[in-house]
Image: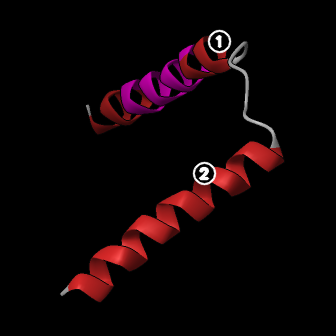
């Protein structure tokens, strides 16, 4: 019984990963320049909140 449960869990994880890869295969990633500018903005707003308290 435990063998079938483990086999089912492994099978579910493999199928889930395949479905996730298919779903994300055609997504566009932001360029490095865009990522760095967004990171800088996020860090600036975070730093501003720390200075206010």
Dot 1, how many residues are within 10 Å of its Cα: few (below 14), some (14-19), or many (20+)?
A: few
Q: How many marks?
A: 2
At x 54%, y 59%, the residue is: 41
Q: Quadrant of the C terminus?
A: bottom left
Does residue 7 appear to the left or right of 25 in the view shown? left
Q: Mark 2 sits on what residue?
A: 38
Viewer-nearest residue: 16 or 8: 16
Start-end of magenta stretch: 8-19
Our reading of the magenta stretch's main secondary structure is helix
At x 35%, y 27%, the residue is: 4
Q: Mark 1 sits on what residue?
A: 22
Q: 35 above or below 8?
A: below
- Residue 24 at x, y = what percent? 63, 19
Q: Is residue 31 magenta?
A: no
At x 38%, y 24%, the residue is: 8
- Residue 48 at x, y = what percent? 36, 76
């Amino acid at each position: 019984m435990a063998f079938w449960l483990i086999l089912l869990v492994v099978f579910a994880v493999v199928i889930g990963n395949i479905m996730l890869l298919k779903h994300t295969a055609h997504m566009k990633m932001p360029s490095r320049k865009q990522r760095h500018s967004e990171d800088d903005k996020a860090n600036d707003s975070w730093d501003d909140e720390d200075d206010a308290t």
